[in-house]
Image (cartoon, rainbow, N blue to C red):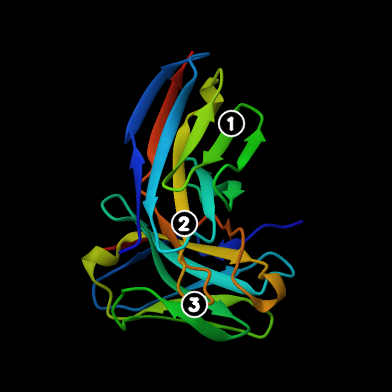
Amino acid sequence: KAGVTQTPRYLIKTRGQQVTLSCSPISGHRSVSWYQQTPGQGLQFLFEYFSETQRNKGNFPGRFSGRQFSNSRSEMNVSTLELGDSALYLCASSLPLRGGPSNEQFFGPGTRLTVL
Amino acid sequence: EDQVTQSPEALRLQEGESSSLNCSYTVSGLRGLFWYRQDPGKGPEFLFTLYSAGEEKEKERLKATLTKKESFLHITAPKPEDSATYLCAVQAPSGNTGKLIFGQGTTLQVKP
């Protein structure tokens, strides 16, 4: 069974640009969560999507947005990039129990974003 | 505020030297505690889920336990390939959400 895939794996952008990252969940998983990982802050929750609806959002500015498609694939977008946005962006998918809270989350390899 | 604290930050062991990693948490109603392993440059790999105090889970040389305030990841007779960062996370209790709150991790190095 294929795992979570994320594209691209590496990305270099300059300040002020915008970027779109993609995540394909494990087949059958309907919940997708996004996290930002940095050496200083660790893993921080960005947002979660379930059935094309944002179910929860972390404490990040509005420059960070996302969406989910009908096939459960998800994208996140960061506009007006700042140097501090350099991080590993991780996507995780899970199989919610009867539409309820997600249980185990399975992570993709991440997208390493560098902002110059 | 929901919080997860892991200790120690770093741990060096000799091959075969057993030890434990600690994860203490403060959440208003635990719905699940998760352990992950992360290798450099990779995404976290799921290890265990624990739901209630007294629960234990085992996998090869790893054993996770849970009390009302903390969880332990016991590593028995570790091998160099167990070297990684071990992350603990709790599921946010509020609402119908899959949000995980992570600790900062314990970086384990096992020397041959």
Residue placed under numbered mark 2 in the picture: B90
Above or below: residue B57 compared with residue A79: above
Residue A11 appears at what percent x and percent y? 41, 63
Dot 1 falls on a residue whose secondary structure is strand
Kindly identify which chain the residue marked by label 1 belongs to. B
Q: CA distance from mark 2 to mark 1?
A: 19 Å
The answer to which of marks 2 and 3 sits earlier in the sequence is 2
The answer to which of marks 2 and 1 sits earlier in the sequence is 1
Please state which of residues B111 and B10 is positioned toward the viewer in this rendering: B10
Q: Is residue B18 left or right of residue A44?
A: right
In the drawing, what numbered circle is on residue B62?
Answer: 1
Quadrant into which the N terminus of chain A falls: bottom right
Residue placed under numbered mark 3 in the picture: B95
Type of amino acid at the residue the image marks with label 2 = Val
Dot 2 falls on a residue whose secondary structure is strand
Kindly identify which chain the residue marked by label 3 belongs to. B
Q: In which quadrant of the rendered view does residue A89 lie?
A: bottom left
| Residues packed near mark 2 inside 10 Å, few (<14), some (14 to 19) or many (20 plus) | many
